[in-house]
Amino acid sequence: MAISKINTSSLTDNSVTAGKIVAGAVDADIAAGSIDTAQLANDAVTADKLANAINTTIAAKATNTAVAAKAPIASPVFTGNVGIGVTPETDWHSSIDALQIGAGASIYGDTTATGNQISSNARATAGSALSGYKYIATDKASTYQQYDGQHNFRVAASGSADAAITWTTGMFITNTGQVAIGPATAVGNNYILNLKAKAAQSTVKLQSINGYDAIDFHNTAGQQCGFIRSNASSVAYNTSSDYRLKENVTPISGATAAVKLLKPCNFDWIAGGNVNGFIAHELADVVPEAVSGTKDAMMDEQYEVTAATDTEAAVMGTRSVPSMQGIDQSKIIPILTATIQELITRIEALESA
């Protein structure tokens, strides 16, 4: 149906509202071109007359469109393992959810425990067992694991594709902040950094600038109390000895009598080797500052009862072990020097008699 004319007198304020124009009331019966410029007198339909009825409807639809456009797309949920640029291996263990990337990278977690791993050229085929890993391709392998608050770094020599991997723990950080590099097994908790050498290799290599400290030692207050310094052809082991650190300085007396009480001896180490030296507790009776520890002392030590797995933390136990005494033989030098001086004085007195 065509509409011949709509004028102002026909449209009183708010007479045409969104509520009165229900969906479908004005439809395809108004064909394109039925209402044209000639039929609409100048200003017959004004913005004021249609504002309440039309603007409310348009605003509502505009808002709905905007909300729909900005609605987030739901993240996909995958069942099974996923590959990016590669079809994932088919023998991942059933307890593992894995994302395999490219030729050999993988990120995965165990559905039976809290923890995750990032691996290179390795896949878990037997769940939590460290022996249950295989190479993806013929190459070396490595893995980084977070479990029970602990960080484990493991490496493996080159192996054939699909062969079983034998891991070597290169480093781990405990959930108490201790660091162990190269340990065969867990060690006691009385350390911050534990280093274990490989067979027939040095444990630590330090390369410092000539004339500068390779290692500095500081006390609890943060003051330097010693250092190891390397030069072009030698190493100096220094303990603090500055006069500004000392008071009540007096000459040593009775050094010869003290040296006569020393009991130097020759002995075999139980672990092997024959040397000359002292027994710690005997030396402590004469030069106590040269000896650390107490005779026959014991201490508690943690040890690994059961090794850790991918899903279970290591089971640790406590045992009592000897707390061995030690000797700093450099502390004997002052009394030996004083003895030599006393002997020189006596010799010179005899010679001048």
Image (tube, rainbow, N blue to C red):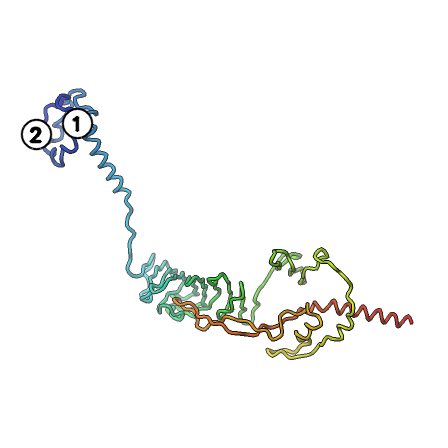
Q: Is residue 193 left or right of residue 90?
A: right
- Write down the quadrant of residue 126 in the picture: bottom left
Task: Please name whichever residue, 169 or 17, is drawn nearer the observer in this view of the structure.
Answer: 17
Q: Is residue 109 left or right of residue 293?
A: left
Task: Please name whichever residue, 21 or 84, is drawn nearer the observer in this view of the structure.
Answer: 21
- Write down the quadrant of residue 271 in the picture: bottom right
Q: Of tags 1 and 2, which is closer to the observer?
A: 1
Q: Label for residue 168? A: none
Measuring from the top left, give residue 210's x and y in whole percent: 65, 57
**Residue under pointer 2:** 1
Task: Please name whichever residue, 231 or 24, is drawn nearer the observer in this view of the structure.
Answer: 24
Residue 23's place in the image compared with 344, above or below, is above
Q: Secondary structure under badge 1?
A: loop
Q: Is residue 18 left or right of residue 308?
A: left
The amino acid type found where label 2 is placed reads Met
Outermost right residue: 353
What residue lies at 59% left-to-right and 61% top-to-bottom?
206
Measuring from the top left, give residue 159's x and y in whole percent: 42, 69
**Residue under pointer 1:** 14
